Image (tube, rainbow, N blue to C red):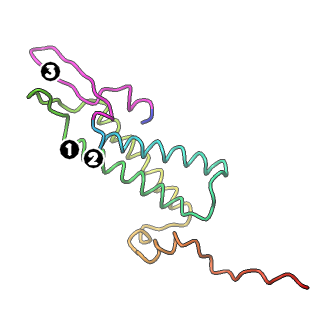
C-alpha cells in the first residue's frame, strides 16, 4: 500500500468515451490518508519489532491488529462512499481505492496471524479484562530481594 497506494488512481471519470483518473489517499484524508498512514506504521513497527528495537513489554500483536483492522475499516467505508464530487461531477472509484482496500485487508490478516502466533485467541479480543491486563505490563513476579549487607 505504501507505493501502489500513491501510484494507482483512486478515482476515475468517463464522459463521452474519454476517461480520466487521478486522486490519491490524501485526497480522502479521513478514510484514505489515515488508513494509508496506519498500514505504513504497522509495517514500520513490525520491522522494528523483528529487529528487536521495540520493548517486549507491550502487546504488539494486539496493537498491530487494532491498527490494521482500523485501516481496513476506514478503507471499506471509503469504498462504500465512493469517489468525491467536484464542481457537481461525481467521481467513481478507481483501481487504487480497491487495491488499498485489498492491501489493508492483507495487512489485517497478517496482523491477525501474528496475534495468533503470539498465543492470542479470537475470544481474547472480546474479553475486556484480558485486553486491559495485556496493556498493564504486570507480569505478577515479585521484585528481587534486596542485596545482602
10 Å neighbourhood of mark 3: few (<14), some, or many (≥20)? Answer: few
Q: What residue do we see at 36% from left, 44% from top?
A: 34
- Residue in the image at 47% along x and 53% along y: 111
Which residues fall within the magenta stretch?
3-27
Residue at mark 1 to residue at mark 2: CA–CA distance: 6 Å
Q: Which mark is residue 14?
A: 3
Answer above or below: position of 13 versus 83. above
User: Which disc number belongs to residue 80?
Assistant: 1
Residue 9 x, y percent position in the rendering: 30, 26
CA gap between label 3 and label 1 equals: 19 Å
Residue 66 is covered by the magenta coloring? no
Looking at the image, do the residues carrying marks 1 and 2 touch, with CB atoms under 8 Å apart?
yes
Q: Is disc 3 in contact with disc 2, using a CB cutoff of under 8 Å?
A: no
Q: Position of residue 28 (x, y in %)?
A: 27, 37
The quadrant in which residue 14 appears is top left
Residue at 34% across, 35% down: 99
* SS for dot 2: helix
Q: Name the N-terminal-most of marks 3 and 2.
A: 3
| Residue at numbered disc 2 | 76
Q: Residue at x 81, y 83 (%)?
A: 146
- Say what secondary structure mark 1 lies in: helix
Q: Residue 85: horizontal and vertical position, in percent?
A: 14, 32
Q: Residue furthest right?
A: 149
Quadrant of the snapshot with the N terminus: top left
Examine the rendered structure and indicate whether residue 20 appears above or below residue 43: above
Q: Are marks 3 and 1 in contact (CB under 8 Å)?
A: no
Q: Quadrant of the C terminus?
A: bottom right
114 to 26, vertically: above or below:
below
Q: What is the distance, in whole Å, between disc 3 and disc 2 at their CAs?
A: 23 Å
Q: Dot 2: within a 10 Å radius of its alpha carbon, few (fewer than 14), some, or many (20 or more) residues?
A: many
Crowding at dot 1, Cα within 10 Å, few <14 / some 14-19 / many 20+, comes out as few
| Frontmost residue, 140 versus 69 | 140
Amino acid at each position: 500500500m505504501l507505493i501502489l497506494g500513491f501510484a494507482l488512481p483512486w478515482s476515475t471519470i468517463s464522459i463521452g468515451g474519454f476517461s480520466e483518473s487521478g486522486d490519491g489517499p490524501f485526497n480522502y484524508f479521513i478514510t484514505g490518508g489515515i488508513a494509508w498512514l496506519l498500514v505504513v506504521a504497522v509495517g514500520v513497527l513490525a520491522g522494528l519489532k523483528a529487529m528487536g528495537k521495540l520493548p517486549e513489554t507491550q502487546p504488539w500483536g494486539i496493537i498491530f491488529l487494532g491498527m490494521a483492522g482500523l485501516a481496513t475499516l476506514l478503507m471499506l467505508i471509503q469504498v462504500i462512499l465512493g469517489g468525491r464530487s467536484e464542481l457537481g461531477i461525481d467521481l467513481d472509484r478507481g483501481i487504487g481505492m480497491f487495491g488499498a482496500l485489498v492491501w489493508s485487508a492483507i495487512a489485517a490478516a497478517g496482523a491477525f496471524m501474528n496475534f495468533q502466533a503470539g498465543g492470542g485467541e479470537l475470544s481474547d479480543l472480546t474479553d475486556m479484562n484480558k485486553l486491559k491486563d495485556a496493556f498493564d505490563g504486570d507480569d505478577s513476579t515479585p521484585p528481587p530481594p534486596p542485596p545482602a549487607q
